[in-house]
Image (cartoon, coloured by chain):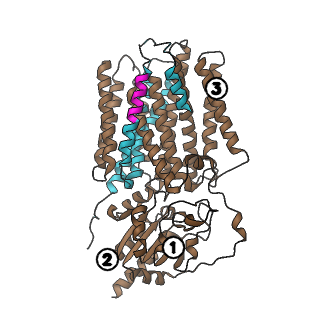
Amino acid sequence: MGGTVVQVAYLAATALFVFSLHWMNSPRTARRGVAAGVVAMTIAVLATWAQPALVRNHLWIIVPILAGFAVGIPLSRVPLTAVPQRTAISHAFGGLAAGLVGTAKYFLWAGEGGGQLTRFRMGALVAEILLGYLTFTGSLMAAGKLQEIKWIPQRPVTYPFQNVVNFGLMGVALTLGVLLVVNPVGAWAAPAFLAIIVLALSFGVLLILPIGGADMPTVISILNSYAGLSAVAMGFVLDNKLLITAGALDGSSGLILSIVMCRAMNRSFTNVLFGAFGQVQSGKAGAEEQVYKQETIEGAAQVLEQASLVVIVPGYGMAVAQAQHRVRELYDQLSRRGITVKFAIHPVAGRMPGHMNVLLAEADVPYAHLVEMDEINPDMPQCDVALVIGANDVVNPAARHDKSTPIYGMPIIAADKARTVLAIKRSKSPGFAGIDNELYFRDQTFMLFGDAKAVVGELVKQLSGAGAGH
Amino acid sequence: MTAAVIVRMAQAPPEAADAHGQGDYVTLLFVLVLSTFIGLGVIARVSRLLHTPLMSLTNAISAIAVVGSILVAGGDFPLEVRVMGAVALFASMTNIVSGFLITDRMLRMFRQAPRERPK
């Protein structure tokens, strides 16, 4: 296939990718977006493959493609609660591909004497391998934390001079990079290149060590952005505009999601990456013991039955307990009684952007009932019962006034404005931010301790039993 | 920081417009800047409901690295280079397949109205 034909095919693929993302603006057209993406990718692969001058070893292409299908299909069937892990693994694979292609290209060109290694290209290569390999190990770490693998610490790991060590490593890697740009084929060039790879791999691990669960949505978004940027860098290395456009679309998506997540926590990028959120605070240890008021299932069911507006606030606890289907049954029971039920979705609820929406959609809750934080908050004073299911920091009123708490300034769902608050909680321990939740000690709040799935199931049973009795 | 390096390189004289007559990196930078603006514009309008499927869709799209991987794996290169290309191709292909499939699977779940429900 001629060069021009390939370029035109790439142009078509680029346009289709833009449409693909454009159609994601509404759930009604979104599936069309996936179809456009599939067509674009198929065009790109075939156009690249059909260049006999460049591609000779077809077996070397067919086998990895088949292997990709063999692993990709099962990976796409994971339970929806495991979607954050799958996404992190996907970022890791993206980073690995960029890193490997960069490494291969460098040694190929250096072996040819370095004539191809212009300064610009060498700079792009350094960017590609840095971003690629740090995204690889960083995302694997994130996936491990999300999957709660035993030997990866869940709680943030911090040590003295952590940021100094991290910045130091990055500084060394960048210095080596600059030296390589100046002289890409000196005697020390290949070892320096390998040293950058090792530094980037270690930096990825060290960067994620101090990250706690509550920061995962932001970190996953940032890694998404890095994976896109590494593809952009590969585009510069290979002089390929399709890689640059598609990578830039991914990079900007990750950037926007990171901004949304940071705003939803009132924090900055640097604060998320280098702030080691989630350390258990010791300052408040002296405060007086506060007591929870507990409620029975029967009592809670009665409170719910008498409401006319119920707002359910789901959080990570709902995902962990896989309680979304029980929650939908509860929604059915209440709607059947003419009670209005809405879901209040905080942008950082769960472990990745949009996590709660997908889980509730899986349970067949119509998306019109999933309401964003900013839209639901004005209605909260009219709300009779706020039912908090496994959410913690996103409903903590301390965020409004307590400057000593790490979540100070974070916008929250105003569950405390509701007449009655029912909170389902797995245990009496504090949330991921490691702080007590004021909401639980308010006069109008009643606690239901237990696994979210079990407790909501009991509530449903109680309500359906009462319904049958009438 | 890396962006600054790239910009500085762009300002350096084009000392070796190489054998393929490539090296027009200013054009490439144009492409990057413009597609970033398009990306920001398009993504900002994506429904917040769909942020999880959006991320899995962009996962699949950024696996466009498949293009580079094919060229490295399929060329007449030394064995170790092709092995790296083949692994990269496997990783990209996994992202493409799982990314598109899971996005579609999630999107099918988003319904305006429930399937059957007494009013």
Mark number, residue A176: 3
Q: Which chain is brown?
A: A
User: What kind of residue is marked 2?
Assistant: Arg
Tell me the chain of label 1: A
| Residue of label 2 | A336
Q: Colour of chain B?
A: cyan
Q: Considering the numbered disc 1 on the image, is that residue within a helix, a strand or a loop?
A: strand
User: What kind of residue is marked 1?
Assistant: Ala
Check if residue A258 falls in the magenta segment: no
Q: Which residues are magenta?
A: B26-35
The answer to which of marks 1 and 2 sits earlier in the sequence is 2
Q: Considering the numbered disc 3 on the image, is that residue within a helix, a strand or a loop?
A: helix
Viewer-closest of A304 and B7? B7
Viewer-closest of A425 and A184? A184
Work out whether disc 2 and disc 3 sit on a shared chain. yes
Is residue A244 left or right of A106 when viewed as pictured?
Answer: left
Mark 1 or mark 2, whichever is nearer to me:
1
Residue at (42% x, 71% y) in the render? A380
